[in-house]
């Protein structure tokens, strides 16, 4: 074979190899000459969701879980399953995350967070790992206790100053609870006291309704406490409170679309009566 | 060794070599261009959704699953591609679930795009959601 024929053979060989490689790339994408599109999809919010038990039913039994998902999972369907190997009945529930990526799920029965129970979750059908912490929790959230379909919303505003009827400057967590429900639903508000919104974790929180003032809006009753702590002291920095069962037909423990509920917790006051929700010894 | 004179006619073999080289450039260029037009970067594989399609335009497609808890695990039985453009309706698709490291999970699935309110629903064999890390699909004419 002459030198030039050898060169031609080499070029042809290289052409065959390179052409094969380049088309193999395209073939790997399942592409043919008529291809018009490639779609790739991945988890909308890769990471681990924070989970907090809510709606205690007494003892170690709970009925609900609040999940805070990583960014990217706002307004997504979340499914939760509790596999209870020691019983014949598992628990299930689902809900849709809000604009902050938080969802409160009421399960179809009570459960415990014991090691034997296995919790599984999905978001939009993708696997959702969960951890029992409040890392991703917002400063405040709301859970409906007696419905798996209705929701409620809680907002908190920090006020520092002198309230009507008060005589000294104090800091308050002013909370408003709302719902779109057209029938009364029982509410439970959760606080993540280590959230940066609060600056630092409160060591004392008390119903400011013990103050002399009662404006009928920001406090429930002049001398009756508005809320009672539901969570264990050990759960702090998570704090769960419920409206008290007072008011008869206009019961403070329930909220209606036309009847928001408001309460106010005074922060870090040492005077007697102003740390009935939490105190350094968590009374 | 004698050097070729300037007025010497070109060597036919050189002409062939030149032609082959040009052809090589063209073939490789076409192949690589084909791949590059359809290429999805590793970044887009890792986060969110990417779509390169003349029928779709730049609108993002959302991928979700229909899943339910069964025999000890959540299992997916459908893939849903949402916000698919109407222009893709009636075209062919192929879809592949991927797991950790981009490894294929199960066989690829072929069908015709049939949209309901912009959603393409693709039934898949029951697959544990923990094994699914991504979805790759091609819509083609």
Image (cartoon, coloured by chain):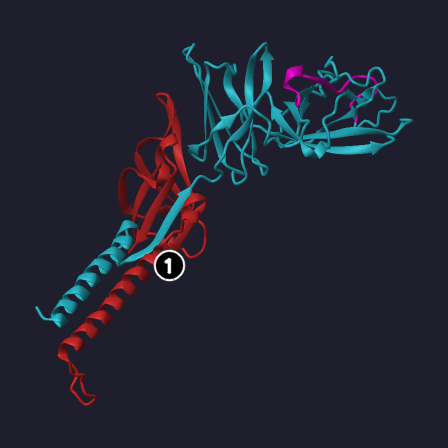
Chain colours: A cyan, B red
The quarter of the rendered structure image containing the C terminus of chain A is: top right
At which x and y percent is residue A112? 52, 14
Q: Which residues are magenta?
A: A219-238
Residue nearest the viewer, comparing A144 with A271: A271
Residue nearest the viewer, comparing A23 with A235: A23
State the residue lying farthest toward the bottom. B7
In the drawing, does residue A283 fall left or right of residue B19? Answer: right
Identity of the residue drawn at 39% across and 37% down: B133
Residue nearest the viewer, comparing B137 with B1: B1
In the drawing, does residue B129 fall left or right of residue A35? Answer: right
- The crowding category of the residue bearing disc 1, from other C-alpha atoms within 10 Å (few below 14, some 14 to 19, many at least 20), is some
The prevailing secondary structure element of the residues shown in magenta is loop
Asked whether residue B66 is in view, the answer is yes
At which x and y percent is residue B121? 35, 41
The quarter of the rendered structure image containing the N terminus of chain A is: bottom left
Identity of the residue drawn at 35% across and 55% down: B38
Identity of the residue drawn at 32% across and 39% down: B103
Subunit ID for the residue under disc 1: B
Magenta region includes residue A22: no
In the drawing, does residue B4 fall left or right of residue B78? Answer: left
At which x and y percent is residue A269? 82, 22
State the residue lying farthest toward the right. A167
Magenta region includes residue A224: yes
At which x and y percent is residue B37? 35, 59
> In the rendered image, which quarter is residue A116 located in?
top left
Count numbered badges in the picture.
Answer: 1
Identity of the residue drawn at 65% across and 25% down: A190
> In the rendered image, which quarter is residue B16 located in?
bottom left
Q: Which residue is mark 1?
A: B54
């Amino acid at each position: 074979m002459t030198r030039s024929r050898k060169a031609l053979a080499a070029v042809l060989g290289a052409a065959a190899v390179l052409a094969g490689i380049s088309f193999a790339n395209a073939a790997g994408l399942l592409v043919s000459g008529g291809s018009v599109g490639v779609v790739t999809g991945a988890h909308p919010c890769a990471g681990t969701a924070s989970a907090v038990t809510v709606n205690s039913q007494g003892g170690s039994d709970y009925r609900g879980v609040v999940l805070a998902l990583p960014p990217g999972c706002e307004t997504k369907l979340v499914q939760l399953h509790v596999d209870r190997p020691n019983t014949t009945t598992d628990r299930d529930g689902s809900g849709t995350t809000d604009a902050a990526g938080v969802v409160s799920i009421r399960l179809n029965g009570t459960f415990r967070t014991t090691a034997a129970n296995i919790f599984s979750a999905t978001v939009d059908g993708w696997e959702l790992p969960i951890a029992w912490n409040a890392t991703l929790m917002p400063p405040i959230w709301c859970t409906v206790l007696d419905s798996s379909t209705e929701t409620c919303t809680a907002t908190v505003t920090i006020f520092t100053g002198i309230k009507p009827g008060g005589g000294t400057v104090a800091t308050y967590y002013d909370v408003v609870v709302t719902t779109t429900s057209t029938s009364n639903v029982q509410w439970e508000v959760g606080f993540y006291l280590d959230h940066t919104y609060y600056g630092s974790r409160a060591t004392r929180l008390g119903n400011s309704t013990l103050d002399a003032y009662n404006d009928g809006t920001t406090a429930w009753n002049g001398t009756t406490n508005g809320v009672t702590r539901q969570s264990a002291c050990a759960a702090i920095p998570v704090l769960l409170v419920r409206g008290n069962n007072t008011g008869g037909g206009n019961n403070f423990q329930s909220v209606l679309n036309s009847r928001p509920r408001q309460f106010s917790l005074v922060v870090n006051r040492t005077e007697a009566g102003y740390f009935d929700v939490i105190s350094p010894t968590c009374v | 060794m004698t050097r070729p004179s300037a007025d010497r006619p070109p060597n036919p073999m050189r002409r062939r070599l030149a032609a082959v080289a040009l052809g090589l450039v063209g073939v490789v260029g076409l192949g690589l261009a084909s791949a590059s037009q359809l290429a999805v970067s590793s970044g887009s594989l890792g986060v969110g959704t990417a779509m390169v399609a003349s029928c779709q335009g730049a609108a993002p497609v959302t991928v979700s699953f229909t899943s339910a808890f069964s025999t000890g695990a959540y299992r997916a039985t459908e893939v849903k591609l949402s916000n698919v453009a109407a222009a893709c309706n009636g075209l062919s698709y192929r879809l592949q679930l991927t797991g950790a490291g981009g490894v294929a999970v199960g066989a690829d699935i072929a069908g015709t795009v049939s949209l309901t309110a912009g959603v393409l629903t693709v039934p898949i064999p029951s697959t544990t959601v923990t094994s699914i890390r991504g979805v790759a699909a091609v819509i083609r004419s």
